[in-house]
């Protein structure tokens, strides 16, 4: 049997076990419900807007709700990825797995694949759900909706890779979650602060504040290369632009980001070891 | 089957394993002994490819582990000291998972077989969360055996078991060995090592101090033997007669007999028996007290450390 | 560093900032390009100071560039370069050299030009007329203005004569009580109408018209030397897409018109609605390039929008009619009509949009508020499109019109709960099975 086939078997077996575990726990269902709940707030807002104005021109009224749902789903995956390795290390089962034909590459690949499959499941649920919402409201779904749904898999890949990297760095599941939450807060805060500062008129700002704005803007731009969520924004912007060049470059950037982070996760798992 | 050359592992300034060269033959039961922190687990982890050696080579089945990692790992079974299980699974599900991982042929038959062997068949459908420590250890043993490995690494295989369990594990070790399997056992229960292992290696502070068969190892560390003689009557003539023998170092007498300390090498019992008879004594029984592995272990690791090091480590 | 030191440093920084902001901007004499770019709908105005190294123009249309020396300063409050055109504006003699890939492709000389405003200076876009046409048109305009003044002078005289005659008649009536027949009265003179069209004075500049591409330009003086600071990159770009945009005025909120720029932008309605539409030609441009073209003096214009596109509304589709289609069949065709927004008197502060009838007494002397195509659409799914005067469907004018369904909040939230309910069932079932297994001997 070739080495590659042996590796595939390892990845397949671990992935199946993880998927079974995911399906059997409430988390993913709760994440889907939460995603629909928040998305439906936006759907309701659009419905109210049409009712109040009598007329609203919208290109894809369900795209933004889908975007929100994707972000929630990806955040859930980031969270589960973040604790996946560290929890298994905590429980000692990681060490036991590595007694067998499992190495860092196959293990990280299996974890990655499992999360991706879970996200694919979520996307299918989203598509069915939004189809129902479309029928219920008569809001249209067009090709950009499906393109966005497909592209969101890349976001999922990025967030899972991000989570797995954190999971290999941190020593316990609790630390992993804390680090993830801190990073997400940092990304969000940087975006909000940069947005607020950029929206302010220069007339109301002192020179110091202008420097602060420039600094925050630079930090925010830097963080956008680290934050996995920024990659979806780029992809969605490319869909909006209907620019295949931008779409391809955003896909390329996303894949590169995922590849780099997964490689780092493998490297760090090797370096850090699998023992408790 | 297992071979290391100059195996070394350093963690920053600390050397956990230092220039370790061991050799385990096919079908051999090898006991790996050492006090806590001696480097046993680090060595096993390196043998399993779970720790990267700082220097040295490892060959399992005559092949470098890195060269054919997956194929080699499929032929190796491991029972670790701690028994980490997926507690949301049943024993059967747990073994099914590992059977798939190792791509075991006829997994259902094999799972039933190993469950019978560790006496867990009747509890195969119970969640592992409810298992006792001993049951978990048995299941870990079943996991280590499910793919019928050619090498078994057993780290403290009997540590959490009751006497029945210890015997079951001992039986499994002997059965596996009878099938021609190679076993690498690290254990603190030295009596069990003594009963089962063909050869032992003793490691201390990362260095292999001794590696040999039981008999040779004991001989190597024993400077004098003790002969206990039960007499009908202890007279001063008998004591003097014995003391005059040139191989005798010390004689302690009591009302029931003599405790003689003599040079190692030959069997002195005939000479002693003859001398006692000649001095008017009657021998009721005579036995030579052998050094236990535990005593040899203590001697090697603590008392004779410098001597053995001088004589050449891992002779 | 202590907290007090930090505070003092921060205060100093703020003080420096405040002083810097209060200082008057530094003025500098620079060689610049004054640019009058055609923006797709009108001629704009911008300039390229020394600090701006790239100029943007639309492809295949005339733009005006002029090499000038002026006083330039940066105005930090609005973050733009300003030119003191009123006090300092000197034309730099020379020719405009255009290069592509380092090779000269044109050497332009200044030529006369003028802007013609057919609908008047304050109405509609201007046309650029160049060369002899510009001079002739300007002359025509001057003659028309002179004719008007002559006619106006004549009118004033005739009017005075008329008024005198009328005064005499009035006096006679007062004194004698005599009555006059209508034909005995003098005819009032007709007031001349001034020319509506307008032509700017003829001046000379470089007229640039290039296909899309990357170029560079420079001004060469009469000795063949490069005029300092006049070497610039030039990007000539074209629209990504063209189509028809709709400007839609909902009857219920006429002050908040909506726009549908492309085919993906669906018109969502609730119930039966009335709306007023205008169809305009539209082009989609790269937002960065377009904003740089129109506001070159603002260094931040278009920044961050390098990947974005924007629709620019151009002229109205002439003789447009809107067709409403249901199930692929035309169910209605609507022509534009003038409408008047009549404010409701009293405290209600409402309004009515009514057909503009110039003969109606209440609309005497009034102008229509807007001209548009009135659509009344009931619940359902429709398509609309524009046909031109020849009855041909205008490309890019198709839009979907959908009525939304009335959906209550609980329906949506119930839908949201479905995954969680499924999850609960799965987990509970699993737990029940597990509980049975835990401690159960098979």
Image (cartoon, coloured by chain):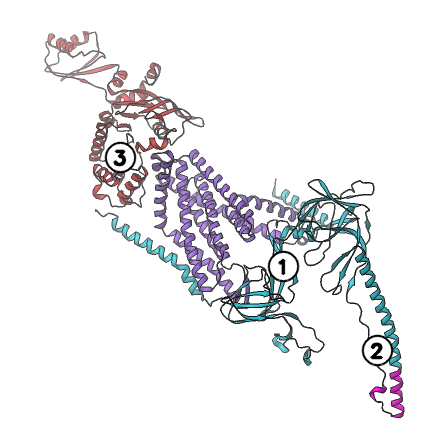
Chain colours: A purple, B red, C cyan
Q: Secondary structure at mark 1?
A: strand
Asked if marks 3 and 1 fall on the same chain, the answer is no
Mark 2 or 1 closer to N-term? Answer: 2
Percent across and percent down for residue C227 are: 79, 42
- In the rendered image, which quarter is residue C105 located in? top right
Q: Is residue B5 left or right of residue C322?
A: left
Magenta stretch: dominant secondary structure: helix
* Residue highlighted by disc 1: C282
Asked if marks 2 and 1 fall on the same chain, the answer is yes
**Residue B113 highlighted magenta (yes or no):** no
* Residue highlighted by disc 3: B145
Q: Residue at x 25, y 51 (%)?
A: C436
Q: Is residue B139 left or right of residue A105?
A: left
Question: Camera-side residue: B203 or A20?
Answer: A20
- In the rendered image, which quarter is residue C365 located in? bottom right
Q: Residue at x 66, y 43 (%)?
A: C9
The residue mark sitting in front, 3 or 1, is 1
Q: Secondary structure at mark 2?
A: loop
Q: Is residue B136 left or right of residue C286?
A: left
Q: Secondary structure at mark 3?
A: helix
* Residue highlighted by disc 2: C189
Total labels: the figure holds 3
Question: Camera-side residue: B282 or C39?
Answer: C39
The residue mark sitting in front, 3 or 2, is 2
**Residue C172 highlighted magenta (yes or no):** yes
Which corner quadrant holds the N terminus of chain B? top left
Q: Which residues are magenta?
A: C165-186
């Amino acid at each position: 049997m070739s080495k590659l086939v042996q590796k595939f078997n390892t990845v397949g077996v671990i992935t199946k076990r993880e998927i079974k575990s995911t399906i059997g726990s409430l988390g993913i269902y709760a994440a889907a419900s939460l995603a629909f709940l928040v998305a439906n707030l936006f759907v309701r807002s659009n419905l109210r807007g049409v009712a109040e104005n009598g007329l609203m021109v919208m290109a894809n009224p369900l795209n933004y709700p889908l975007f929100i749902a994707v972000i929630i789903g990806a955040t859930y995956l980031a969270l589960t990825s973040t604790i996946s390795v560290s929890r298994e290390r905590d429980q000692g089962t990681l060490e036991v797995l590595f007694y067998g034909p499992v190495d860092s590459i196959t293990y990280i690949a299996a974890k990655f694949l499992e999360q991706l499959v879970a996200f694919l499941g979520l996307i299918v649920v989203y598509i069915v759900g939004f189809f129902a919402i479309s029928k219920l409201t008569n809001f249209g779904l067009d090709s950009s909706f499906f393109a966005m749904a497909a592209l969101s898999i890349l976001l999922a890949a990025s967030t899972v890779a991000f989570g797995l990297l954190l999971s290999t760095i941190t020593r316990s599941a609790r630390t992993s979650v804390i680090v993830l939450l801190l990073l997400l807060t940092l990304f969000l805060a940087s975006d909000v602060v940069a947005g607020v500062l950029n929206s302010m008129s220069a007339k109301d700002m002192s020179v110091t504040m202008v420097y602060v704005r420039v600094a925050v803007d630079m930090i925010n731009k830097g963080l956008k290369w680290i934050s996995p969520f920024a990659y979806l924004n780029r992809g969605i912007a490319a869909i909006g632009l209907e620019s295949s060049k931008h779409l391809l470059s955003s896909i390329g950037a996303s894949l590169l980001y995922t590849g780099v982070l997964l490689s780092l996760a493998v490297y760090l798992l090797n370096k850090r070891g699998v023992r408790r | 089957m297992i071979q290391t050359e100059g195996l070394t592992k350093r963690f920053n300034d600390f050397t956990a394993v230092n220039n370790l060269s061991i050799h385990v033959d096919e079908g051999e039961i090898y006991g790996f002994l050492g006090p806590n922190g001696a480097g046993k687990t680090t060595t096993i982890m390196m043998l399993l490819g779970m720790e990267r050696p700082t220097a040295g080579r490892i060959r399992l089945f005559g092949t470098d582990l890195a060269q054919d990692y997956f194929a080699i790992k499929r032929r190796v079974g491991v029972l670790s000291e701690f028994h980490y299980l997926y507690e949301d699974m049943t024993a059967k599900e747990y073994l099914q998972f590992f059977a798939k991982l190792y791509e075991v042929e006829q997994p259902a038959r094999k799972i039933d077989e190993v469950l019978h062997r560790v006496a867990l068949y009747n509890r195969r459908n119970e969640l592992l969360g409810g298992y006792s420590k001993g049951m978990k250890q048995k299941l870990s043993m079943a996991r280590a055996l499910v793919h019928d490995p050619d090498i078994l690494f057993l780290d403290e295989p009997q540590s959490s078991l009751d006497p029945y369990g210890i015997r079951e594990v001992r039986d499994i070790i002997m059965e596996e060995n009878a099938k021609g399997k190679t076993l690498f056992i690290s254990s603190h229960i030295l009596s069990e090592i003594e009963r089962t292992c063909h050869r032992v290696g003793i490691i201390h502070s990362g260095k292999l101090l001794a590696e040999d068969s039981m008999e040779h190892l004991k001989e190597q560390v024993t400077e004098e033997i003790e002969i206990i003689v039960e007499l009908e009557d202890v007279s001063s003539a008998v004591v003097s007669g014995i003391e005059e023998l040139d191989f005798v170092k010390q004689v302690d007498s009591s009302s029931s007999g003599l405790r003689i300390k003599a040079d190692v090498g030959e069997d002195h019992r005939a000479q002693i028996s003859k001398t006692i008879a000649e001095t008017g004594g009657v021998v009721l029984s005579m036995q030579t007290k052998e050094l236990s592995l535990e005593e040899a272990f203590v001697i090697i690791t603590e008392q004779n450390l410098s001597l053995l090091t001088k004589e050449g480590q891992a002779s | 560093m202590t907290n007090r030191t930090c505070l003092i440093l921060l205060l100093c920084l703020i003080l420096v900032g405040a002083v810097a902001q209060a200082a008057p901007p530094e003025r500098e004499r620079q060689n610049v390009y004054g640019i009058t770019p055609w923006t797709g709908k009108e001629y704009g105005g911008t300039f390229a100071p020394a600090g701006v190294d790239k100029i943007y123009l639309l492809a295949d249309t005339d733009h005006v560039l002029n090499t000038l020396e002026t006083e330039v300063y940066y105005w930090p409050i609005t973050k733009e370069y300003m030119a003191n055109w009123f006090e300092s504006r000197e034309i730099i003699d020379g020719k405009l050299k255009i290069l592509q890939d380092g090779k000269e492709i044109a050497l332009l000389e200044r030529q006369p030009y003028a802007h013609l405003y057919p609908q008047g200076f304050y109405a509609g876009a201007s046309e650029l007329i160049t060369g002899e046409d510009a001079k002739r048109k300007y002359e025509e305009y001057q003659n028309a203005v002179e004719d008007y003044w002559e006619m106006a002078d004549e009118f004033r005289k005739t009017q005075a004569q008329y008024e005198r005659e009328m005064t005499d008649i009035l006096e006679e009536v007062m004194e004698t009580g005599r009555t006059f027949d209508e034909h005995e009265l003098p005819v009032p003179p007709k007031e001349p109408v001034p020319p509506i069209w307008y032509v700017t004075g003829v001046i000379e500049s470089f007229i640039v018209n290039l296909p899309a591409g990357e170029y560079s330009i420079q001004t060469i003086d009469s000795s063949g030397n490069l005029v300092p600071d006049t070497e610039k990159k030039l990007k000539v770009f074209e629209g990504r897409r063209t189509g028809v945009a709709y400007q839609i005025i909902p009857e219920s909120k006429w002050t908040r018109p909506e726009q549908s720029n492309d085919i993906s932008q669906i018109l969502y309605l609730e119930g039966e609605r009335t709306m007023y539409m205008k169809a305009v030609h539209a082009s989609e441009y790269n937002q960065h390039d377009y904003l740089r073209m129109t506001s070159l003096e603002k260094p931040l214009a278009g920044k961050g929008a390098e990947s974005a596109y924007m629709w620019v509304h151009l002229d109205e589709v002439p003789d447009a009619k809107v067709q409403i289609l249901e199930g692929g069949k035309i169910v209605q065709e609507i022509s534009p009509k003038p409408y008047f927004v009549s404010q409701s008197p009293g405290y209600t502060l409402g309004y009515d949009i009514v057909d503009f009838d110039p003969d109606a007494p209440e609309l005497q002397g009034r102008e229509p508020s807007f001209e548009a195509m009135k659509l009344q659409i009931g619940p359902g799914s429709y398509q609309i499109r524009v046909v031109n005067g020849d009855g041909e469907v205008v490309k890019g004018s198709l839009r979907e019109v959908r009525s939304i369904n009335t959906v209550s909040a609980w329906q949506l939230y119930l839908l949201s709960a479905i995954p969680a309910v499924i999850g609960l069932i799965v987990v509970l079932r699993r737990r029940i099975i597990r509980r049975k297994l835990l401690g159960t001997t098979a």
